[in-house]
Structures are given as structure tokens and as C-alpha cells.
Image: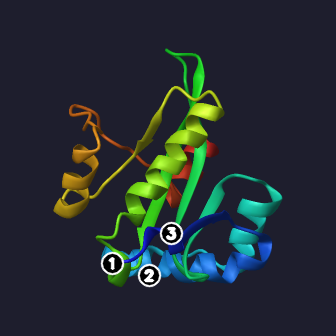
Amino acid sequence: MKNTERFKLRFAEEKDTGLILSLIKELAAYEKMSEYVTATEEILRESIFARKAAEVLIAEYDGIPIGYAMYFYNFSTFIGKPGLYLEDLYIKPEFRGNGFGKITLAYLAELAVKRDCWGMEWTCLDWNEPSIQFYESIGAIHWSGWRIYRLKGEALHKLAIS
């Protein structure tokens, strides 16, 4: 077990853009989705730091980056409040099992409470059994009956001009 006192979370800065892209590519490889990564440092710099479309936490162990969490805010019309949407949570494989993912989620939960969010949500690949078990162990529930839909690329443009 790694010493959790040597684990630290910090908000990403613009100078971390290359690191963020590198960690995104590691996550994509783990999820067997590398071919879908089209982000570049320029795109991330513009989206995260100029447009502020998302926020990023960098996870470090002894000052060495070992993961990240990227999140943004959605909105619940039924509740009338924003929610914290966790887009990515990634801890390098050699650092998993030390409680760092849970510490990161707890930090995000505290942030959601401080920012008066109704709650947090995220998605998980249906084959990722270790993550599913972990999420359920902390009290997260799977909302069955809901499907995620995406409109992008040619279909998005086709609808936009219709």
C-alpha cells in the first residue's frame, strides 16, 4: 500500500495541457478507445483554460503526476440546481488499489457540496467490473432504463442545417 499522505490533488494549470493530453491517451488505451482521441494540446488549452468548459484535477504521488479527474457542470431542471459531471477519473494502473480514486471522488463530492450542486454523476463502461464494484461500494447507484445518446460529426451538421 502506498502512503496516502504522499498523494496530492491540485487544480491543473495551462502549463499542464500536454500532461492532460498524455493522461487522456492513457485512459483511452485502458478503455480500448485510443482511435477516438482527436484532442490536441491546442484544443484542450482552448476548451479548458480559455472557454472554461471543464476543470481538471491532477493527482500526484511524491510530486509525480499519476492521474487526473476532468469534470464540468450540468443542470437538473427538475431540481433546479447544477450537478457535477465527472467526465474522466484516471489513476495509472500501478497506483490503483491504494485509495487514490476514492480520495479523488471524496474531494469532488466535497467540491460539489461547497458549490451547492444537487449531486454528482458519471458513466462507466459496462465491462469495467472493478470500477462498477468500486462505485457501488461507495453508494453510487446505476440508473437503469436510461440510455446515453450522442449526436456528432456528420449527423450533428446535418441536423444543424436542416
Percent across and percent down for residue 55 are 66, 55
Residue type at mark 1 is Tyr
Percent across and percent down for residue 104 are 48, 57
Residue at x-position 70% and y-position 77%: 17
Helix, strand or loop for disc 3: helix
52 vs 95, left or right, is right
In which image quadrant can residue 134 be found?
Answer: bottom left
| Label 2 packing within 10 angstroms: few (<14), some (14-19), many (20+) | some
Helix, strand or loop for disc 2: helix
- Quadrant, the C terminus: top right
In which image quadrant can residue 30 be found?
Answer: bottom left
Q: Nearer the viewer, residue 79 or 39?
A: 79
Percent across and percent down for residue 51 are 79, 55
Task: Give the number of the disc on residue 30.
Answer: 1
Marks 2,1: beta carbons within 8 A: yes
Marks 2,3: beta carbons within 8 A: no
Helix, strand or loop for disc 1: helix
Asked if 126 appears above or below 112 in the picture, the reply is: below
Q: Nearer the viewer, residue 74 or 39?
A: 74
Task: Give the number of the disc on residue 5.
Answer: 3
92 vs 21, left or right, is left
Q: Which residue is mark 2?
A: 26
Residue type at mark 3 is Glu
Q: CA distance from mark 2 to mark 1?
A: 6 Å
Nearer the observer: mark 3 or 1; the answer is 3
Q: Nearer the viewer, residue 93 or 153?
A: 93
- Quadrant, the N terminus: bottom left
Residue type at mark 2 is Glu
| Label 3 packing within 10 angstroms: few (<14), some (14-19), many (20+) | few
Residue at x-position 77% and y-position 66%: 46
Asked if 75 appears above or below 38 in the picture, the reply is: above
Name which of mark 2 and mark 3 comes first in the sequence.
Answer: 3
